[in-house]
Amino acid sequence: MVVKTSVLKELEAAYGQDGNQLITLYGRADSEKEVLLRAFLQNKKYFYYRAGAASPKEQCSRMGREVADRFGVSLARHTYEEYFNRIRSGGPVKLVVVIDEFQYIAKKDSTFLEAVLKLKARRLYPGPVLILLCSSAVAWMEKEAMGLFGESGAKKINQKIKLGNLNFLEVVRALPEYPVAECIKVYGIVGGVPGYLNRWNPKADIRTNICRLILAQSGYMHSAAEELIGASLRELSVYETILANIAAGCVKLNDLYLTTGFSRAKISVYMKNLSAFDIVEKVVSFETGGWENAKKGIYRIRDNYVNFWFRFIYPNLSDLYMMSAEKFYDAHIAPGLDAYLNRYFAEVCMEYLGLLGMVGKLPLKIKKMGTWVGKEGTIDIIAQNEIRQNMVGACNWDRPAFTMEMCEELFTSMKLAKISAEYYFLFSAKSFAPEVAAMAEADRRFVLVDMNEL
């Protein structure tokens, strides 16, 4: 099962510290929070309680039964302070206390967080303890949770950990049976969401997995895009209209105004909400001297799977229900999939350069990196050091070879962006034209990177 190993390391580091720690841990429903917790709790003394929707009295009684059964104790009072007073590790080792989906308690019963803070302060349990308050209610955690702790209580939280998606390198490690090219396709379709990757079958091809997981009405991800949006945002019809139009190429506020009929003010508010939950992002071009030639105020769908759904499936819902999954894939997904994946290949190439920079294997020490989106042309990657020396990158996913014509397109875009470069990284998923290979052989400023190196 796939988990975010960097978060496991953070939790282990906290567990190894002296004294008591209080950590909040949260992530979307498919972050596989529970899988991560099981991995972390192995070989540790712990108490785990998962809250559910219940009245304050019923919730308190349920936790009391868990404490009594887990530790074999009789409870004199049914309060959270009493429960935390009766937990034990059975020795000097640190006890881990996990309250999962704690929002169901904290929203309705203020005595719970009061007891948690007393536990952290060693007023209820004398031994060392690591307290994990976990939640899959992302919107609530980011907007409301800290208010329930109060200003002084919030300061007593040692760490706030948000479970993010896997990066591309982690996706490759999660799918060892797949070649890199197939991993790029998976990454572009479902992103680095652990729950999606754990259900992907690496022994089957891309088409089979899409048909089984996404297109089939019983598929695990069939309703995942709408559920993700609906879990955090109301007025689903408005959000889906906006997302469908962004996926179709309406990427500026004025474009959305003209196609949706919504007011500019309304669209701005909804875009802000979508951005807050990492569903949409505003594209900001790498700052260069050619600012007047750059596109400004462009939006794109940030979540990979939401982008895939609204690009290929949402516009063709009628056929989704009238065709077999295989026929739908062949008619609506296969013809445009490579063009769609260009963006994600560029993201993978940028991550690759970032990793090389971390281990000191780039000719320049990079301070910042990004993309330049021009009114005419795009520079996939610009990486710059502290004295504004540049490396530029161009990425070819869907064409048979990286050609000199593509190099000329890059040079033209650089003129519009008003930048020069000390080095050029040319990435190709397939091959390089002989004249490009000859140019790189003669001019060491040009570095060719093929799929095997990635």
Image (tube, helix red, strand yellow):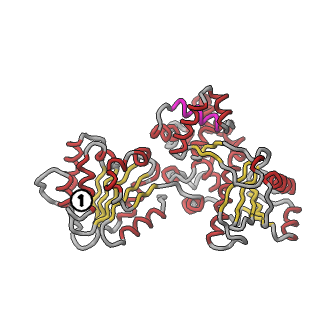
Q: Residue furthest top?
A: 261
Q: Is residue 307 left or right of residue 228?
A: right
Q: Is residue 195 left or right of residue 433?
A: left
Q: Quadrant of the C terminus?
A: bottom right
Q: Residue at x 82, y 60 (%)?
A: 432
Residue 326 placement (x, y as % from top left): 63, 39
Residue toward you, 271 or 225: 271
Residue 71 placement (x, y as % from top left): 19, 61
Q: Residue at x 40, y 68 (%)?
A: 12
> In this view of the protein, can residue 401 be seen by the observer?
no
Q: Residue furthest left?
A: 76
Q: Residue at x 70, y 63 (%)?
A: 384
Assess disc 1: are there few (<14), some (14-19) or many (≥20) residues with their C-alpha within 10 Å of its C-alpha.
some
Q: Secondary structure at mark 1?
A: helix
The magenta stretch spans residue 245 = yes
Residue toward you, 30 or 364: 364
> In this view of the protein, can residue 317 be seen by the observer?
yes
Q: Residue at x 48, y 51 (%)?
A: 195
For badge 1, the amino acid type reads: Lys
Q: Is residue 331 left or right of residue 208?
A: right
Q: Is residue 417 above or below residue 40?
A: above
Magenta stretch, residue numbers: 236-246
Residue toward you, 325 or 276: 276
Residue 350 placement (x, y as % from top left): 67, 59
Q: Is residue 390 above or below residue 136?
A: below
Q: Main secondary structure of the magenta part?
A: helix
The magenta stretch spans residue 244 = yes
Residue 136 placement (x, y as % from top left): 41, 48
Residue, disc 1: 118
